[in-house]
Image (cartoon, coloured by chain):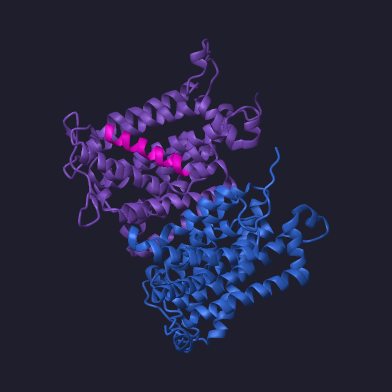
Amino acid sequence: MFYRETGEFRTSYPNDSQTFPIKFDRRLYYIMLFAAFGVIPFLINDYWANAVFVPFLIWAMAALGLNLLTGYCGQISLGTGGFMAVGAYACYKLMTAFPEMSIILCIMFAGVITALVGILFGLPSLRIKGFYLAVATLAAQFFLVWLFNKVPWFYNYSSSGQISAPERTVLGVAVTGSFTEAWAKYLFCLTMVFVFAWVARNLTRGAIGRSWMAIRDMDIAAEIIGVNPMKAKLSAFALSSFYIGMAGAMFFANYLGAIEATEAFGINQSFLVLFMIIIGGLGSIAGSFIGAAFLVLMPVLLKNILVGQMGWNTAIATHLEFIIIGGLIVLVLIVEPHGMAQLWRVAKEKLRLWPFPHAS
Amino acid sequence: MLEQLLFGIEVALNGLMTGVLYALVALGFVLIFKASGVFNYAQGVMALFAALTLVGFQNGQIPFAHLINAVLGTNVHHFGWHLPALLSVVMALASMVLLAVIVERLMLKYLINQEPVILFMATIGLAYFLEGFGDMMWGSEVKKLDIGLPVGPSDSIESFTYDLFGYGFFIDRLDIVAAIVAALLVVTLTVFSQYSKIGRALRAVADDHQAALSVGISLRFIWVVVWSIAGFVALVAGIMWGAKSGVQFSLSLIALKALPVLMLGGFTSIPGAIVGGLIIGVGEKLFDFLLGPIIGGATENWFAYVLALLFLVFRPQGLFGERIIERV
């Protein structure tokens, strides 16, 4: 009854081409933004920030990045963990080399550096595709993580081989370091993710996004109709790595504070992000968020129920988590290869006609 | 200098042996890829699962003991028997066949006609599932696999080469067994696919799904057969790796090592898998031996991938792969 476009007249082009053309969607979006910016920061505490919200936002950023590459441009990458490591270490080097530089700039420059590395590892995509490419990106994953472990320059010759984030402030409020308050951390990550999700959404609506989708759907055909595959593929790699690099930088600076490359950015993280976009929805911005929320929340929930309520040991909960994730991936691919975002789209279609399924 | 050279040769020989083990895993990939076009990422986890099952049967572990204990509050671990090695191998093989049937029934059946990439991702999901399932069933601690294979350095080779060169080569007997087994496996598989009825059906399916269907070959049956064979190869690989370094999670990571092997050899070629495995095995050992001390060691982690990456840029279909032809 409530999800209707009846009576909504679009009388100008900007009106027609807005991101959420239907009023209900738009309202939902504003309500969610209000809740995220205006309500949660006042209620949040350390547990919720560290266990749920901050990891969710950071993984959402990484998933956004991978979705640009895999979902929109159709190039599978298993190097996400490696690129996140580049972002984290670049951010660390920038933070320690230029102490006056704003943390926001540090994170963005870390993204730019990751983008350059991404272009380098994206070069093979011009020759190979599909899972050949997926395997080739594994080279990025293993080589980069190895590099950060073996070259002491990257971790400033610290004896433990770890890097830890010094304290940095935004507008006088600490957002990194050990004295950061939960709300500041949350709000910082939220702002970054919000801004760049907005950018991503508009990128995918524009010429560059359409050239990616043309390449994804059929690269030879796209080339024939005048899409430059080199430009499209490399720009997808660059932008995707930019997002992933920023996610890595935030993962290091805002979330964990101190990391060691092998543990924090292993191959499992690459798969985790890939699963997020598969479950959430390939080629959907909202899907990146849904997938990230799902895979961040589910382990927390399982752990609370199995370990907290039923008193099982953590090992079994972890195994069960693997089983459930694996099972879900297969299930999602069988039932709905386009992920949960597609379910939401279908639900909206149904709602529009409800309760008259045969109308229109 | 001569000492160094001989040591280098020894390193290369050991690399060759490791390469055989990579090739064993890669073989499973190639089999499934040829027959169904599915790039089975779960092959490595299947090796782990097979080895876990084998050890579990042999030691008489109770499946899901941890889960049962957690739910019912009991404290059960073992049935209290030890099965002979051969029997447990047969039982493990039976479980792999069962797994093949289940995978076909619950997964592949619904994914016919999907893009290869979707199938690839589905097998990643399967890999995760199996990993959790195997650990849940048999426990995640490192297990010792012992079915009576010879292990340890071979004295006769050491003394023989000592007499010959004045330098004893150190070669693990297990590696020699693995090489022999791999050779046998390749010969058996080749003979099977060339001369048996099912083997011919397999090749027909690999050639053209629709044409195979139209002459009355059951695709679903063939897939079960292929996955069973891949399960068998996984079991062999699992036994070899398990005997070498214990049955543990890292076993599933050799699947990742098998990927560059495949890319070198080409996805559709059985000899390619073997040659690729040998190249990677020797290459990574020699590279680490020659350049490792200069650039910091542990290069084995990435050497194979970077080699494959560079290689693919120049020859996308691999050494022995079929030429890639694309049409709009």
- Name the residue at 76% across, 64% down: B201
Main secondary structure of the magenta stretch: helix
A118 vs A15: above or below: below
Residue B105, how many percent across, how many down? 64, 60
- Name the residue at 67% across, 57% down: B36
- Name the residue at 59% across, 29% down: A227
Which image quadrant is residue B178 in? Answer: bottom right
> Looking at this view, is A354 or B29 the one in front?
B29
Is residue A338 visible in the rendered image? The answer is: no
Question: In this rendering, would A217 be left or right of B207?
Answer: left
> Looking at this view, is A357 or A53 the one in front?
A53
B83 vs A336: above or below: below
Segment colored magenta: A105-121
Residue B189, how many percent across, how many down? 68, 71
Residue B101, how many percent across, how many down? 64, 65
A28 vs B304: above or below: above
Q: Is residue A111 magenta?
A: yes
> Looking at this view, is A173 or A87 the one in front?
A87
In the image, the chain rendered in purple is A
Q: Quadrant of the C terminus of chain A?
A: top right
Q: Is residue A205 magenta?
A: no
Is residue B75 visible in the rendered image? The answer is: yes
Residue positioned most to the right:
B215
Question: In this rendering, would A260 be left or right of B219?
Answer: left
- Name the residue at 18% across, 45% down: A178
Residue positioned most to the top:
A11
User: In the figure, what tint was chain B given?
Assistant: blue
